Image: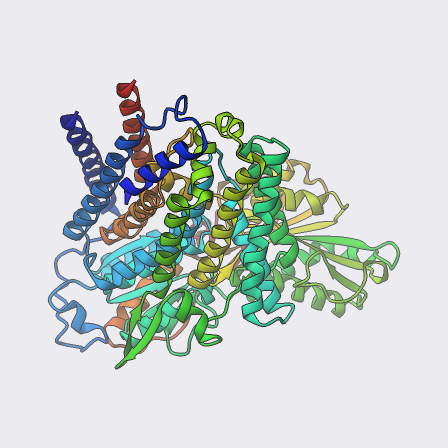
Amino acid sequence: MSVGTNTGNGAAIKGTVPNKGLGIKGKAPKKVNQRLFAFAALVAIYILFCLLGKNFFSFETALNILDASNYIGFMAIGVTFVIISGGIDLSLGTVALCSAMVGGVAWRVWGLPFWVGLILVLVTGVAFGLFNGLLVARLKLPSFIATLGTMMIAMGLSSIVSKVQTITYPARTELPWFKNIFQKWQVPNGTSTIDIPTGAVILLIVLLIAHVILTKTKIGRYTFAIGSNEEAARLSGVNVVFWKTVPYVISSFCAALGGIAYGCTYTTIIPGYGQGLELDAIAACFIGGASTTGGIGSVFGTIIGVFIMSCLKLGLPSMNLQPHYQKLLTGIVVIIAVLIDISQQKKKR
Amino acid sequence: MKMKKILSTLALTLVLGVALTSCATGGTATTTTAKAGDATTVATTAGPAATTTTGAKPYIAVISKGLQHQFWQVVKKGAEAAAAKYGVDMTFDGPASESEIAAQVTMLDSALAKKPSAICLAALSTDSVTDQLNKALAAKIPVIGFDSGVPNAPAGSIWANASTDNKVAGALAATNMYPAIKDLVKAGTVGKAVRIGVVSQDATSESIKSRTTGFIDKMVELLKADGITAVAVVGHDMWKNGTAEKDAAVILDVSVAATSGAADCATAASTVLNKDVIAVYGSNESAANGILDATEEGAKLGKIVAVGFDAGIRQKTAVRAGYFLGSVTQDPYNIGYKAVELAYQAFKGETVKDVDTGCKFYTKANIDSADIKDLVYD
């Protein structure tokens, strides 16, 4: 998987911009190692909890990990594109929940069919993405500032749209298909049920599509090119304004998917909520080997980062520990991951 | 090169391992272990979830709505006392803030995965945990609601509740505030209305909604009894009563904080305080602290009659100083204690029913009296 990323990446550079001066080739191989390293850490953490936790090694816990990973997973896949393009998207947490809020209000309050609400969620997400893209690519705002503004706008909008009322997504009894498709399909089995994690299947499909887009299409090639060296990309004739907008749209679209997943798994959408979720998604990208300076990253690495975090989230309580330790440990993992990245870059030079 | 990679991988595993084990030693303190003399064999009474815990000590998972307030720490103390008395293993978890619904759902998921003997739950949102409650119901795991409980839960999933009747508690605040403002509200006329501020941390949680509603309903009732019917409730869609401000002699102005964060509660409080109110009510500790934040710890309240809810060192200081007329207190220790007690009884197969854990009004005069001082935590 990782090799694919890098060759696709290299080929893209050759086709579009002069290879010289981009300095990508030298950096590429070690990223494989960081992803392997992240994967090894994930396996190690999982085994550790299986040994120390109470009932951690069970299908039920595995399902719980998938549930906890789902919404963050979508957001993290999306923001990987922005980070590879050399930017940052701080708005995606509140954009996800604001989009989910719009869809929820459309259904609960405005009385539209629920599937229309779901489409509105995605439309809202894309609109936020276009707005971010406009600010960053055309108006040349630093992505940090632009998306910080959007974060607050989304937060405010979700309160305004909902009139500061909590909105609940359909419960399983209300619209069974929603949870059956986006979270778990519950097959009756005696008094209990067998749960099939359909939400995780959707995440997997989105992951594969994102991987193909990133490694096999023009969108991916230009995203890497702009992230590696925007000036070189521009000089070689890439329409930077357009191609720099695309990652933000993808990011917000994925955030909206994350919003649907959140609404499905947790049902209650609180007005103005969502701030902080973007940081989990961004941390996952860096654990998964994305470079802080752009031009490097993969969605597979990112998803490993997501699972490391959810493993900690579910594993610590199985050892009768407060889940708050998860943040502390995730912080340590992020710092170590980036430290290793930097030390290896230095050595290469 | 290769060596370095291996080393770095090892380093991470090591760090994680150390971090985890050190947490484990720090954390186990929260697990209450029973003393000897509790040889509870499941054989005597066939408890509902007996099969899952045969031979081991019963395990009760307590999931609260938060840990950030001192209130929850006293609930925890009560829960620990009951756990020690009945000889059960108990864990007490709660999300970092009361907006963290996802975190609480995850906690409930992992509690269920541990196949507990019983669960005590104070749900942030019932809708978010419906699936989990049905799962517990199917697995015959007793669930006890505590504090605000689990309103509108699927039928049969909540075996009993240990909670304060929040509407009664909110009404208690109104009943005690009314004598102090009676003359002022009687002077209010249409066109020159008097205003009473109500600060609510949110319009989401059932307990906070009920305390706000309980106060408003009781206040409207008391005003009506004195012949004042031109009352407008404004400020939030949930409580507004259709009467316009211009047609009212008394206005109840509800201000809901944007988030449960301290800064937003303070903003919500100063919003109403700036509207020339004669009295103000904060419906939980955050809201009362918001009022304190907006008024230099109450010193700037002046003639405004303030009534709070819950306790905490800041609110107690304000009551002692006379800035607050008084506050309503629940009995957090009793809530925690009764919750675990009910959970244990349910596990043993005994019939359990709802327990009202009570509330009281405390003022400068009685704050140190015997029946109050243990209820008002610092």
Seen from this angle, which residue lies furthest top? A349
Placement of B305 over or under B241, stated as above or below: above
Question: Closer to the camera, B206 or A154?
Answer: A154
Q: Is residue B309 left or right of residue B250?
A: left
What is the x, y in percent for residue A319? 22, 50
Seen from this angle, which residue lies furthest front? A15
Residue B117: quarter of image: bottom left
Q: Taking the image as drawn, is residue B322 in sight? A: no
What is the x, y in percent for residue A191? 27, 80
Seen from this angle, which residue lies furthest right? B191
Residue A71: quarter of image: bottom left
For the N terminus of chain A, give its image quadrant.
top left
What is the x, y in percent for residue B371? 45, 55
- The residue shown at (65%, 68%) is A110
Q: Is residue B247 left or right of residue A97?
A: right
Question: Closer to the camera, A98 or A181?
Answer: A181
- The residue shown at (49%, 76%) is A174
For the C terminus of chain A, give its image quadrant.
top left
Placement of B214 over or under B180, stated as above or below: below
What is the x, y in percent for residue B8? 20, 30
